[in-house]
């Protein structure tokens, strides 16, 4: 949180914690967990934001494969010291050390030739042919390491949103070149665009649209408002609301919340020390009002931690399967998939929702490392494989929580700083703008591509791409439209959406239709 934390803010935060009450750990409705099996799904909804920090290269994530588009894509990216062009649909993997029939290069484990062709997907709805694309119809595919997402797409629980990015208002290539309409501030800055994606404003923003959604629905969670906005990835402006305070959970190991010093049976060799620490940090009999307020917040935080940790020991929560082991597809070595571990915690939080008494939640998880200026062929494929592995695990975990399929109640979506240039710098890509994202869930109208998939190709050899300038794709769908479509499903009214997304009225479509 930016700015100075004054006494008034501390009191507001403390008020959020106090909703739990001193007896919260003893008020858990454990019987509800034991009788969940076989019952209908409770009135519950959750949004899960998966943020890809660093800027994912969308051009090697979701690809158009019609002959015209593929030719320009391949010509643009099959250059440099370490070409990043993927292989066409149906290409068999070239064994390491052998020569590719497509490129004439010797394959190694970190070259696209060794991975085989991109994976075809067939949208339910035909995409319009944009200006500059000379094709009678468009076909599409995913990166070779996104096999689990291809399966989810074909099963109808995954959709693609094409060419989305931060926008002030719709903008064309000529308008961008002429600087005749406003565009987002600090367009290619990581910190500013991460903030603009999450909060519709550059770095320093205090509230995000996920937090403002949480403000709207927090009252539905009764005395458990504190658990409305939950992060497993540290503090995120996306979850900061006007009244709701984001709650942070640990990932992987128990307990879910750790308050150092006051937990456990021994501290510095003393069995009395933990209780003494707890008494000291929760003492409100102080002459300083600020200190007393702070102690009250700490006491409530300890109570909340006890509540969460108790809930996470219940059978309905512990029955959520652990994320499976992950293997780096480039090196063949086992690695930790931090995104899968975060989504494991989210799945267990959803399992605990009936125990905690929450009906609406917004979650934030993240995976970093996407700033692929260099070594893109060794970095991005592994990260994409981690996303596919994590989302597939999460879909499966939600399919049976206490005997109930919760997938229709949870919508998961990706976001990232920006995409990368369609052009390559030799072995990587640079900061760009519009990109493609995934939306997953049982309520998602999957097996389709929403928004306009753009014309692909660099302005070379007389070709003039109407959607791209200097390798940068101009988005045709805004974050505001993306967020509003998610918010409408979550329960926000049209007037509330106009408040949360004040620029929404300036775009032609308020509802993108994927939910």
Image (cartoon, rainbow, N blue to C red):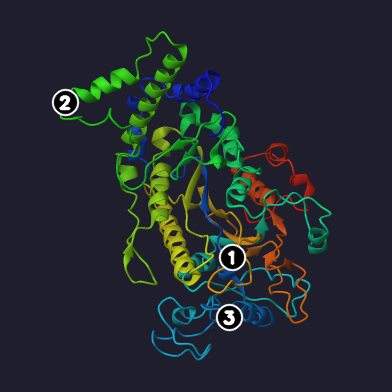
Q: Is residue 506 above or below residue 358?
A: below
Find residue 58 and name its label. Answer: 1
Residue lying at the far top of the rendered structure: 287
Q: Is residue 364 above or below residue 379?
A: above
Q: Marks 3/2: CA distance?
A: 65 Å
- Disc 3: which residue: 78
Between 196 and 451, which is closer to the camera in this rendering? 196
The image position of residue 313, as x and y in percent, is: 29, 39
Element under label 1?
A: helix
Q: Are marks 2 and 1 in contact (CB under 8 Å)?
A: no
Find residue 457 and name its label. Answer: none
Residue 161 shows in this picture: no
Q: Using residue 414 as the reference point, say whether residue 313 is left or right of it.
A: left
Q: Mark 2 or mark 3, which is nearer the start of the sequence?
A: 3
The image position of residue 476, as x and y in percent, is: 72, 60
Question: Which quadrant would residue 219 be assigned to in this image?
Answer: top right
- Disc 2: which residue: 271
Q: Are marks 3 and 2 in contact (CB under 8 Å)?
A: no
């Amino acid at each position: 949180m930016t700015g100075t934390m004054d006494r008034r803010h501390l009191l507001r935060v403390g008020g959020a914690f106090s909703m739990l009450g001193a007896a919260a750990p003893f008020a858990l409705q454990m019987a509800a967990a034991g009788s969940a099996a076989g019952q209908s799904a409770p009135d519950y909804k959750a949004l899960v934001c998966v943020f890809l920090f660093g800027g994912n290269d969308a051009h090697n994530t979701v690809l158009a494969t019609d002959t015209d588009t593929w030719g320009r894509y391949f010509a643009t990216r099959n250059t440099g010291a370490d070409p990043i062009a993927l292989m066409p649909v149906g290409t068999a993997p070239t064994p390491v050390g052998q020569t590719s029939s497509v490129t004439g290069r010797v394959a190694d484990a970190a070259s696209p030739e060794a991975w085989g062709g991109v994976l075809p997907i067939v949208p339910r709805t035909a995409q319009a042919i944009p200006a500059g694309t000379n094709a009678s119809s468009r076909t599409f595919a995913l990166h070779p390491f996104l096999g689990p997402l291809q399966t989810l797409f074909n099963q109808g629980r995954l959709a693609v949103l094409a060419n989305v990015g931060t926008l002030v208002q719709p903008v064309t290539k000529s308008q961008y070149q002429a600087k005749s309409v406003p565009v987002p501030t600090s367009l290619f800055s990581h910190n500013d665009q991460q903030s603009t994606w999450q909060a519709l404003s550059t770095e320093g923003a205090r509230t995000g649209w996920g937090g403002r959604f949480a403000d709207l629905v927090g009252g539905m969670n009764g005395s458990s408002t504190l658990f409305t906005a939950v992060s497993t990835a540290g503090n995120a402006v996306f979850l900061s609301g006007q009244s709701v305070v984001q709650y942070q959970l640990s990932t992987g190991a128990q307990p879910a919340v750790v308050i150092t010093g006051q937990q456990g049976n021994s501290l510095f060799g003393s069995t009395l020390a933990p209780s003494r620490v707890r008494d000291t940090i929760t003492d409100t009999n102080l002459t300083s009002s600020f200190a007393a307020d702070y102690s009250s917040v700490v006491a409530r935080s300890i109570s909340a931690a006890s509540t969460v940790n108790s809930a996470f020991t219940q059978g309905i929560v512990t029955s959520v399967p652990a994320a499976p082991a992950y293997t780096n597809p480039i090196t063949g070595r086992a690695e930790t998939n931090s995104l899968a571990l975060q989504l494991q915690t989210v799945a267990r939080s959803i399992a605990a929702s009936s125990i905690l008494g929450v009906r609406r939640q917004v979650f934030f998880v993240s995976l970093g490392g996407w700033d692929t200026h260099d070594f893109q062929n060794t970095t991005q494929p592994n990260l994409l494989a981690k996303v596919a592995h994590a989302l597939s695990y999460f879909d499966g975990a939600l399919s049976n929580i206490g005997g109930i399929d919760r997938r229709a109640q949870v919508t998961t979506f990706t976001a990232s700083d920006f995409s990368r240039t369609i052009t390559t710098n030799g072995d990587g890509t640079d900061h760009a703008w519009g990109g493609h994202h995934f939306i997953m869930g049982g309520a998602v109208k999957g097996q389709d591509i929403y928004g306009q998939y753009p014309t692909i190709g660099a302005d070379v050899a007389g070709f003039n791409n109407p959607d791209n300038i200097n390798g940068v794709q101009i988005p045709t769908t805004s974050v505001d439209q993306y967020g509003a479509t998610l918010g409408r499903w979550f329960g926000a009214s049209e007037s509330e959406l106009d408040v949360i997304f004040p620029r929404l009225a300036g775009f032609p479509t308020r509802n993108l239709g994927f939910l």
